[in-house]
Image (cartoon, rainbow, N blue to C red):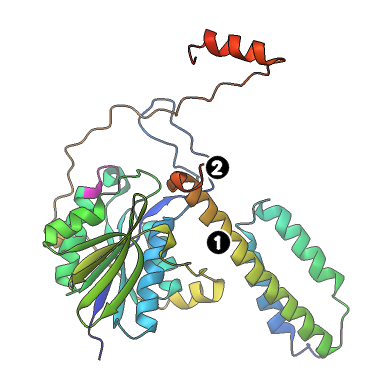
Amino acid sequence: MKMANPLRGEVLTLYKNLLYVGREYPKGADYFKRRLKAAFLKNKDVKDPEKIRELIARGEFVIKELEALYFLRKYRAMKQRYHLEDDKTK
Amino acid sequence: MAELRALVGVKRVIDYAVKIRVKPDKTGVVTDGVKHSMNPFCEIAVEEAVRLKEKKLVKEVIAVSCGPKQCQETIRTALAMGADRGIHVEVPESEAEQLGPLQVSRVLAALAQKEKAGLVLLGKQAIDDDCNQTGQMTAAMLDWPQGTFASKLSLEGDKLTVEREIDGGLETIRLKLPAVVTADLRLNEPRYATLPNIMKAKKKKIEVVKPGDLGVDTSSRISVLSVEDPPQRTAGLKVETSEDLVARLKEAGHV
């Protein structure tokens, strides 16, 4: 039997965390889920631990980017609704 | 060294990104099967409390929410952001509609005293009813000073300096603790409640109490007569020439 990759747990955690963040994705959770799955499947044959770590880091970067995206989206919505006097020029 | 305890109010509201639909019988808005989340201004209040704790100016952060059982999810989010424990003031769904700023401020005031909180941090208003009254009323119930619409907050000993967003500028005031502060949009950038933190938050305690246990009567004397959609914006029209434009404006009585 094949030994499980020691990074397997980390990859699964990343996938779960991405799935969770993706629930709020503007284009819908389903859209995000499909893209996410495709992205992970594309790299399923990567064996080199160095390379896997690199990919995990990329996934974590995507989470940070999504959090920033959600923050900005919410901030803009609130600003538009409650600080109208600030940007009448818009 | 820091003995200060902060009480943060969090409200569960319909998510800001959801398109609100009014019920056909005009008694309210559709909430069944609609995504809910923490009121954005409450997130800002939680973040500020957690930052004060990280600076070791606050000993403990308590997140409070009033309403039906689902409010515990909102408290959980606050715990994931860094609050230490939660209090859920349970009001059954059938009576939750009666909860207005007056009732909630009574609950918050009672809890602030029970928990010996020195700082009550709230969002300036909720995005569902847009009342902007709970903080002010809570301060009045406790007879504490208030710093509303805070865009900056600094704490030194028992003195609190609050920069407030007012029409056309900023106002800086100094308050003596205990005090009530309500958060405006620019106070901070709230952190995201990540999945690992939500999981960790499940270990934190949420105490469930009834308004009656706090000696608070939540009956309301306000009855909602009708809830309606805002008027639809009518379509614009294109004009060919400036004469045409002037004629149209005259017709509409603008010139």
Kind of residue at badge 1: Phe
Give the chain letter at badge 2.
A
Could you tell which of marks 2 and 1 lies nearer the N-terminus?
1
- Residue B14 vertical position relative to residue B56 in the rendered view, above or below: above
- Residue B14 vertical position relative to residue B62 in the rendered view, above or below: above
Q: Is residue B64 visible?
A: no
x and y percent of residue B67 in the render?
A: 31, 53
Residues at marks 2 and 1, CA–CA distance in whole angstroms: 23 Å
**Residue at the spot x=79%, y=70% of the render?**
A40
Q: Residues within 10 Å of mark 1 (few under 14, many from 20)?
A: some
Numbered circles on residues, count: 2
Disc nearest the viewer among 2 and 1: 2
Q: Which residues are magenta?
A: B97-101
x and y percent of residue B185 in the render?
A: 42, 58
Give the chain letter at badge 1.
A
Residue B118 occupies quadrant: bottom left
Question: What label sits on residue B114 in the rendered view?
Answer: none
x and y percent of residue B179 in the render?
A: 20, 68
Q: Quadrant of the C terminus of chain A?
A: top right
A4 or B21: nearer the viewer? B21
Residue A57 occupies quadrant: bottom right
Question: What label sits on residue A89 in the rendered view?
Answer: 2
Kind of residue at badge 2: Thr
Q: Is residue B100 visible?
A: yes
Residue highlighted by disc 1: A71
The dominant secondary structure in magenta is loop
Q: Secondary structure at mark 2?
A: loop
